[in-house]
Image: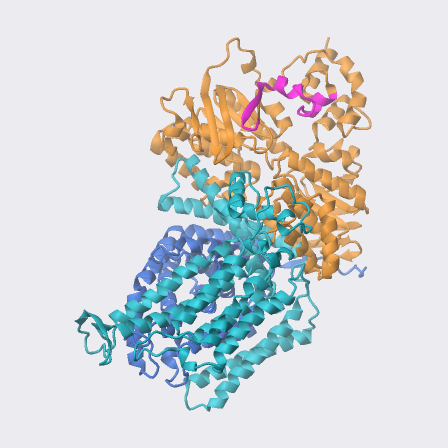
Amino acid sequence: MSATGEPTIRTAIRIRPRSTITIAMASFLGFVAFLWPFVVPPGTFSSTETPPLIFGVLLALVLAVVFAEVADGGIDAKALAMLGVLSAINAALRPLGAGTAGIETVFFILVLAGRVYGAGFGFALGCTSLFASALLTGGVGPWMPYQMFGCAWVGMFAGLLPPLRGKAEIAMLAGYGALAGYLFGFMLNLSFWPFSLDPSSSIAYKPGLSFVEQWHRYLLFDVTTSLGWDTGRAITNIVAILLAGPAALAAFRRAARRANFRPAVTFHDREDLSPS
Amino acid sequence: MIGFDHVGVSYEGAATPVLRDVNLRIEEGELCLVIGHTGSGKSTLLAAVNGLVPYFTGGTLTGRVVVDGRDTAHFRPRELADVVGVVGQDPLAGFVTDTVEEELAYTMEQLAIDPAAMRTRLEETLDLLGIADLRSRALHTLSGGQQQRVAIGAALTAQPRILVLDEPTSALDPTSAEDVLATITRLVHDLGVTVVLAEHRLERVVPYADRVVYLPGDGTVTAGEPAAILARSAVAPPVVELGRLAGWDPLPLSVRDARRHASALRRQLPDTPPVSHRAAHAATGRLAAPPPAALTARGIIVRYGALIAVRDVDLTLRRGETTALMGRNGSGKSSLLWAMQGSGRRAAGRVSVAGAATDPAKLPAAEARHLVGLVPQTPADLLYLDTVAAELAEADRDARASADTGARARAILDDIAPGIAAGMHPRDLSAGQQLALVLAVQLTAAPAVILLDEPTRGLDYQAKAGLTGTLDRLAARGHAIVVATHDVEFATRGCDRVVVMAEGEIVADGPSATVLTASPTFAPQVAKILAPLPYLTVAQIAAALDQVAAP
Amino acid sequence: MTGQAGQAGAGRGGAAGTGGLPAGRPGTAGTRGPPADRPGADEPHGGRRLPRALHPVAWWLWAIALATAASRTSNPLLLLLIFAVLGLVVAVRRTDAPWARAYRYYLFMALTIIAIRIVFRVVFESGVTPGDHILFRLPHIPTPSWYSGIQIGGPVSLEAVLSATLDGMRLACLLCCIGAANTLANPKRALRVLPGALYELGVAVTVALSVAPQLVESVQRVRRARRLRGAGGRGLRALRAIAIPVLHDALERSLLLAAGMDSRGYGRTGSATRASRRLTAALMLAGLAGLCIGAYGLLDSTVPHGLGIGGFAAGAALCVAGLALGGRRVSRSRYRPDPWRWPEWAVVGCAVVTAVVLCLNTGYNPAALNPALYPLHWPSLPLLPTVAILASALAAFAAPPPPATTILAGPRPAPRAGEMTLAGVRR
């Protein structure tokens, strides 16, 4: 980041190697939890309704562990206050988009904040935003771990994008926002596909089918039910990032400089002091 | 209780240290007042007390700060939470939870205080601060003064022996400010809490201070008896300025003390002041015919649902006249300003601006601002670009798009507040500079009428004097100006006319000298000291004394 | 509506509505409008009880148990009964907080789920059995060969529609159970039961909940101020001119808040020693590794079944242990913790009875829970499950009446008139 001559902005949340391993394992578990209809061999589960529930509980546990691990000494008051305030923005923005043809307003802050404050912060912000929003609107339920995980990924990968600056950066973020919009929809649909349709419907999840057949059914389900929404979400992200992205990035970077995360602290004239 | 031993503070990347070689000793139970201009290092000094400097801000601290026997080099701010309570400028920004009770409990929860003890302590704190009736209220629905008292309460529940308050009243109106300051002084007297207070409403606190710490702005600090320090400091309330002028010793710090000294002065002064209290800007008052009207408002009514904010108000603003709009919070001042500008709600009434055929409310926003310009209470709301230069260019573009007035924002800004760098971020400017920038942006549209909503909030003496000068110059060029303000001293120095509102109606309207001296509570300090003589400012007395001495 | 409801609630601090019992808040008694009490408190057995919030966990357990029961049956009569129980309890025991208004959205979602299931079953039909009652036929759209097995259109049978409806009803019922928990449990109090290891999550969310209303005010203020610069409050340029000042405001606020939290003792180290922190980390890492092994066992069928299950079980146990131990790194106490007394036990107990009866399949014909569609017949109402479901409704009376909510609706001058009318209507 310092290659462009700007002062380096320290990431808001320190990620130790241990936390990296934790997040990597959690992500693996997340992938299994989302993609089980394709990757788990048929016959492993007896019912189509139990796995989503089991995986929901599993994801909640995994998220708790990751958050506890990252938080252990990693989240100071500045990062936490920033997390709270940005979650508030997201929680306040979210109902704006709900119900209006796929307008998804949460990703804008999530992507930009993840970009500026780092992957760890992005991950945490994804979790807290969705949690706060669910509490405010009374939307707590088994779908929450899935949504939290999805958003946490969106925020985390935004923090891992290559260090571009200027127009290239905005273009990259807009592209990422669009991609994230589609992928988020794809994954989230997958989380309730297995039980949301009557099993006799020909686009419903049917245990025991081969990967290709299952994939066909899901693609058709995804296209019919939510392609419009996902496109709406992707377009919202592109427009918002292109339009307000540069100014918002500047605001975030300025805040990061002012916040001076994990500052260098020195005390001088200490040698002549005795503990009082 | 608090000891600063050769303390210096410098921030990362800053060329000069903010504080140098500060030696300070504040004893238990003292109320220590920290004074100095904006940017002189007051906040740094206060934040060093509980270690926020340097742990939170970063930077280097030389020397040592010892608080209640604990060296901040060894104790982080959070480990000093039970010794030092901190209250900031904007209470709402510092709240973690959303109801009064939870907020008061938050600090105790962090300190892991036993639930039963917590409950008793919380009840005591509620009573101590007189906020028991607010206990289950949502914090953001409280008034500023109530919020600040809750913030003080939240700091007190940890039972700290020191309370640090950084300009706790700068965002409040005078009534709330007085509430808060009364609370603070009571804490000092009843509980023996050591209070370190930075404040620029000196006239309210100076009488209670045991010690004054003055920061002249070069990083050094002078501390001592209030009278001794104020005799030399650049910031001083009018009562002190008067005392200095009259050579009173000991220097009086309150109106009461000053009145005791004043009888001799009163005998010495002529019955009518030889110069107007607006001597620097006396041109308008003496004209035979009143200047032409710039804006005429008739029958203005503003209502929000069942609440009537402005009740059938008539108001005429004249060119070259600065009017102070005063009254308590919620008396309809803001609503009236917004209604006159045309952007705000208006249920009934007409506004006509000289030289324009149409009511500004009926014009598109871009044209209305060429008639009437309004600077809102939070000027920063209007700023959204990255640099001062960009904001100014945008202002030029906006103004030219509707009617080219020939005015250029940069020139106007340099006239109001010279020396604001073009590359600065508008949010990094001081409150006074932000106000100047927004005023310049609004003046680019060359409106004949300029309305300012609470511009003095958060300004120090210097910035207020600067604002007075700016408004005087604008008035001299023929603008009609209205300033909604709570600040009596500012209204005295800067305004020709005072309009007082209550419950949406105008209850007093007249020349400031008449309105401000009519009631003892509403009068500026000098008037209170010299009553019944109609003197309002120290400058008037100086002129009168010169006249007496000259012949 | 919001303000009025809140205001009416605020007036409830007075003593008159609770049969002369001392009011919990002397400060508010008598200062506001006439008392407007919850319907529940007017009932004879509720009259002697002080309003208080039931422990949020109790409501969640009640809802989960009821959901478990609902998942056992596709008998429309039983499902309707569960809907009725949910409706009753929500109507009697919800507050006027914003989250408590969510229930209607859940009902709406429930209907949508049923509709979607029917539509998708009808459109993407996958064949009919010979004896089916055919309702109508949709035009059959041929699908390309690579879309093997997916059919669009064709005959629609009554059995197919019914099966989709009943299944949809069950899912909708589960959703409504969750909705009821969201409506009844106070989420802010639920945050307090988060384990200590997730303390930061709780604080971040608390901050978010308290900052959100301020942000809304900030947006309104900036939007209003926009006009002063001659620009409207709409359009894409306005979006930026409104968003950026609000964002700056919020970020500055966060820094002030952080300073405040730091000086108020946030993050004071708890009783955890260095060794116990290491142990926590090791437990959690090992736990995740165990879960990963379990997950791998699912993917690869060559892995012995026991290893997969064992991995999951051990991993979950280790994670929980790690979280429990991790809670010691922060030391804090709770102000006025929610009590767990007999009403909590009663609420949880009655729903557990329902769940157990519907899971055990004894004392009644298990087939009555899932009536067959072949041959079509009217479902019967088995006695024991009916009684068991009705037992859950006892929660409405076991739970104390909810307290007044003043959290988000503070007294403002305007809604005073509304307060009167609302109170009058309730009487």
Residue toward you, C259 or C358: C358
Residue toward you, B37 or B6: B37
Magenta segment: B502-529
Q: Does C368 appear above or below B109? A: below
Taking the magenta stretch, the answer to whether it contains residue B507 is: yes
- The tint of chain B in the picture is orange
- The tint of chain A in the picture is blue
Percent across and percent down for residue A222 are: 31, 69
Image chain in cyan? C
Residue toward you, B264 or C27: C27
Asked whether, in this view, residue B129 is left or right of residue C202, the answer is right
Residue at 78 percent of width and 43 percent of height: B188
Give the image quarter of residue C340. Answer: bottom right
Percent across and percent down for residue C364 are: 46, 81
Taking the magenta stretch, the answer to whether it contains residue B191 is: no
Residue A131, visible in the rendered structure: no
Residue at 37 percent of width and 33 percent of height: B366
